[in-house]
Structure formats: structure tokens, C-alpha cells
Image: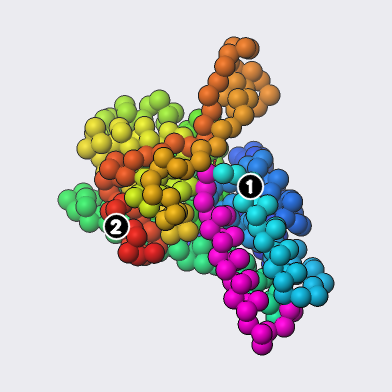
Amino acid sequence: MMATLQAIKYNDGQLEILDQLLLPESCTFIPICKVEDAWAAIREMKVRGAPAIAIVGCLSLAVELRKLAVPESKEELCRMVKEKLDYLVTSRPTAVNMQLAAESCVQLCARLSDNTLLSVAEAKGDIVKHLEARLANDVADNRAIGEHGACDITKKNATKDKLRIMTHCNTGSLATAGYGTALGVIRSLHAASKLDQVYCTETRPYNQGSRLTAFELVYEKIPATLVCDSMAAAAMREFKMDAVVVGADRVAANGDTANKIGTYQLAVLAKSHDVLFYVAAPFSSIDFQIPNGHSIPIEERPHSEMTHTGSTRTAAAGINCWNPGFDVTPAELITGGIITEKGVFKPDQLAPHQ
Ligand code: MRU
């Protein structure tokens, strides 16, 4: 069996990430030696995708902590950990995973501080273990998402032998610790010989679909066709899609979902073509503190992503641009359900399972 693509390599306090800005031309790994390196790599999108952002952020802190001399007190240790986590959270605003990872680590710090039986060195070791555990946990969650999603989609299309799935952006091994979320569902369908074809959108303006998802699909020899975003409606009608499966950067408590710009239009199109629309995401992408999608912060990206291809200008000089990185799909358009590691839920059924 072919080894799955691995974009985050971590071994004994050494962290390297695949520089996604250089894909698909070159597979180059770069070292991440401190929290500032991770912050810059996330901001520049050398690593991107909601789960991968949190994993690289957390691992960069583990790298630093392993090298750190044991602080004088647990208070000093926890203050430093919190400061660095707060800083990492500022790297990109829409995906919630880093914020939730930071909150969980700060809660752990509070428990460690309260435990008078524990030395500072032991507390430091526990924080490192907690941060490092994200890598393996994420792959396990993704495999479960893949199984649940493939099972649900197959069941709801029981009369069909092979299925046609549309996906958007990149949600695969490059966006996670491995296997992927929406792309994990597609991998599981393929492994079960249930996939006819996956249609991946180009995902303008940053081209995560054509640069990254297409790269992963070719690498894994999964039958796939690339379409421009503007071809989605025509492709849905022409190829009679069985489901659309996308990822999430932040799911609000009511199921409204922020994901890569262009997701909302696919959900509208799916509704009018009677195609099931699924979101695949780990529980670590669900923000139960936010009641609905109106409160999700949407990142605005540089205009140059729209006006230039590489260093070549492709839009008229002087034109104004609007470049939101994400949009919000209302829960009622998520007709298939939200696929998580705990099962597939209707958008309004998430809370009891947190
Ligand atoms: O701007 P990006 O490339 O970080 O956006 C990524 C997405 O929107 C993904 O769909 C989402 O993070 C889920 S990745 C499993």
C-alpha cells in the first residue's frame, strides 16, 4: 500500500512542515524551531487548513518547551505557555481549532498548578505530552470521519453502485495530520470501491483545489476531475453528483459553517440540484460558544491573490477587489449532515454530543 502523504513531520522535539506555497512544483520541508516560526508559516499559508494550523501551532510550542530549562515555578511556566498560545491564536482568525486547542491547554495548566504533588518539571512534561498528542489524535479522528461519512453517503445512495462526489478547497493530508476530513471521506469511499469520480473545484483565488487537492488525488491515484469554480453548476447537472462534501474552519453551535470562500455557493447549487450537501469536520472545529454564523470572524486576504497569478498581473491595474477567505453556509443548506469522528449529525443535533 502506498504511504499516505505526510505534511507535518514531528520526532522527538524536531518539527518540519511541507511548504505548501511551493506545491505542486516542489516538495520542500522547512524546519519550525519556535512559536514565531509557526506563526509566520501559518500567516503566510505555508501550512493551512484548520486542523493543521492548530497542530503546527501546538507542536511548535512543544518544540520550545522541550528545549526550555525548567522554570522556577509552575505559575511562571503556565504564564509563559498562555502568552505563547495567545500569540499563536492571532495567526489567522477564522479557523477555531487553534483557539480551542489553546483553551484546552490553559485549562490543563490550571489543573497542573492546583496539583501540589506535581513538580515544575513534571508539569512541563505533561504540557508537552498534551501538545504532542494532537498529531496522533487528529489522524484517528480523520479515519473515523472517513468511515462515518462513507457509510452515510453509501446508505443514502443505496441504489447506486459507484458515487460521484464534489469537493472544495483542500481538506486532505495537507490540511490535517494525515488522511483528511472531507477528503478522508472520499478516500474511504475509494477504499470501499464505491467511488466513481471526485470532482474538485479549483478554489479561486488561492487555488487550494487545483494546487493541493489535485496533487493529493493524483498522488493517491483516486479517480478525479478538476473543474473551475464557475463550472460547478454545469458539472452538477452534467455529471449528476451524488453528494458534495466539504470541510469546515468553524462550525457555530447551530451548525452554520464557515469554510473556504465558494462553499456557500456550492451549498445553494446542491440544494437546487437535489444533491446532498455534507460538512466533514472534527469536534475540534465546532465553536459552541458562538450561537450562529453571524459572529464568525471572516479573514480578508490580500488583493494580490486576485490580481496576480504568481508575479504576473492578470487583473486591470487600479481595480478595487474584495477578497474574503471564507464564507458561511447556513445550517439549513447542510442537507446531508455534519460528519464528525463521533458520527453524522443534523446541524442542530451537535450540542448533546460535545
Ligand atoms: O485558507 P485555508 O486554505 O486555510 O482554508 C482551508 C479550508 O477552508 C478547509 O476547507 C478547512 O480548513 C478544513 S481543512 C480539513
Q: Is residue 9 visible?
A: no
Residue 121 placement (x, y as % from top left): 74, 79
Q: Position of residue 173 (x, y in %)?
A: 53, 53
Q: Is residue 118 magenta?
A: yes
**Which element is circle 2 on?**
helix
Figure check: 52 above or below 59: above
Q: Nearer the viewer, residue 83 or 339?
A: 83
Taken as a whole, is the magenta stretch helix, strand or loop? helix
Q: Looking at the picture, which amino acid does disc 2 mark?
A: Gln
> Is residue 305 rendered to the left or right of residue 139?
right
Numbered range of the magenta stretch = 94-121
Residue drawn 57% across the image and 24% down it = 306
- Look at the image and say whether residue 299 sits in the magenta stretch: no
Please rate how many residues cluster around mark 1, counting C-alpha atoms within 10 Å: few if below 14, some from 14 to 19, many from 20: few
Label 1: which residue?
90
The type of residue carrying mark 1 is Thr
The quadrant holding residue 286 is: bottom left
Whether residue 250 can be seen here: yes
Q: Is residue 250 left or right of residue 197?
A: right
Residue at label 2? 349
Whether the residue carrying mark 1 lies under 8 Å from ligand 1 is answered with: no
Q: Nearer the viewer, residue 169 or 133?
A: 133
Q: Is mark 2 within 8 Å of ligand 1?
A: no
Residue at left offset 73%, top offset 63%: 80
Q: Is residue 219 above or below residue 101?
A: above
The answer to which image quadrant residue 266 occupies is top left
Report the Cα–Cα distance between label 1 and label 2.
30 Å
Which residue appears farthest toward the left when viewing the image? 159
What residue sits 72% from the left and 75% below the top? Answer: 74
Q: Of callouts 1 and 2, which one flags the residue occurring earlier in the amino acid sequence?
A: 1
